[in-house]
Amino acid sequence: MNGAAGSAAALAQRLQDLRAALPPSTRLLAVSKGHPAEQVRALAALGQRSFAESRLQEATPKQQLLADLTPLDWHFIGRLQANKARPVLRQFGTLHSVDSLALAERLARIAAEEGLSPAVFLQVKLRPDANKSGFSEAELRQAWPRLRELQPLRPLGLMTMAPLGLDAGERRRLFDDCAALARDLGLSELSMGMSGDWREAAAAGSTWVRIGSALFGAKPDPSQP
Ligand SMILES: *Cc1c(COP(=O)(O)O)cnc(C)c1O
C-alpha cells in the first residue's frame, strides 16, 4: 500500500506510455474532468501543458487552484451553453464543441467584446447518434462561408466523437471521413480520439487526442460525469 506515491508513479507511467505511442503529429489533450487539481499539477510537472474540461462549474475552482503555475493551455470540450459563453471564453483558449452557426456567432460577438481570439473546433456528427450534437456534413458545408469569416474566432479544425457500438474498422472509416472533410474545407487540425479509440484516430491523422481515463485512471468520484 503506497497510496499517493503509487498513484503518482502510475500516472507518470501512463503519460510516458501514451507519449511513446502517439505519432509526432498527434498531441495529447489531457481530459481532467472528474479528476482533482493535484493530478493536473502532477502532469504539468512532467511537461504536460494542455488540459481539457467539459463543465465550467468544475473547471473554475480547479483552474483557481492551479493559478500559481505557468499558465496552462486550457481547452473546453463540453456542450457549450449559450449563457456560459463569456466565462468559457475568458477561461479557455480553445473550444472543441462549437456545434452550430448560432453558437459560433454568439462566441464571435462576445470574443470581440472581450478582446479575445479563441481557437475553435467545429464539432461534426458524421454518423447517426442520438446522444451527441454536431454539424452534419451538409450543414457544415452550408454554414462554412459564414463560419470562416466570423472574426475574431480562429477555426482550426473539426472535432468528432464516434458513437458507441462501432467496431475499430468503422471508427477508422469515420475518422478518415472527418479528416477528408477537414482537408476539403482547408482546415488543418483534427480533434478525434478518446481513451477507447485514440489509436484509430491517430492512424487517421488526428492532431489532438482527448484522453481522460486512459491517462488519469479510474475516477475518484463516480458522481462526476
Ligand atoms: C470525457 C471526454 C473525453 C475523454 O474521455 P475518456 O474516455 O475518459 O478518454 C474526450 N472527449 C470528450 C468530449 C469528453 O467529454
Image (cartoon, rainbow, N blue to C red):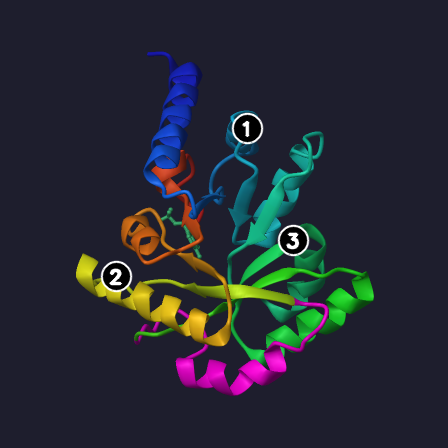
Q: Which residue was labeled with disc 2? A: 172
From where the camera sits, is residue 129 visible?
A: yes
Q: Report the Cα–Cα distance between label 3 and label 2.
A: 29 Å
Query: Residue 36's spot in the image, x, y percent?
Result: 52, 34
In the figure, is residue 72 to the left or right of 177? right
Neighbourhood count class around disc 1 (C-alpha, 10 Å): few under 14, some 14–19, many 20 upward? few
Q: Residue furthest top?
A: 1
Left or right of 114 on screen, residue 211: left
- Above or below: residue 164 compared with residue 93: below
203 versus 124 height, above or below: above
Disc 2 to disc 1, how far (Cα)?
Answer: 35 Å
Dot in front, 3 or 2: 2
Q: Amino acid at mark 2?
A: Arg
Identify the mark at residue 93; answer none if there is no mark: 3
The residue that disc 1 covers is: 38
* Residue drawn where x is 67% and y is 69% of the image: 107
Q: Which residues are magenta?
A: 128-153
x, y (%) of residue 178? Answer: 37, 69
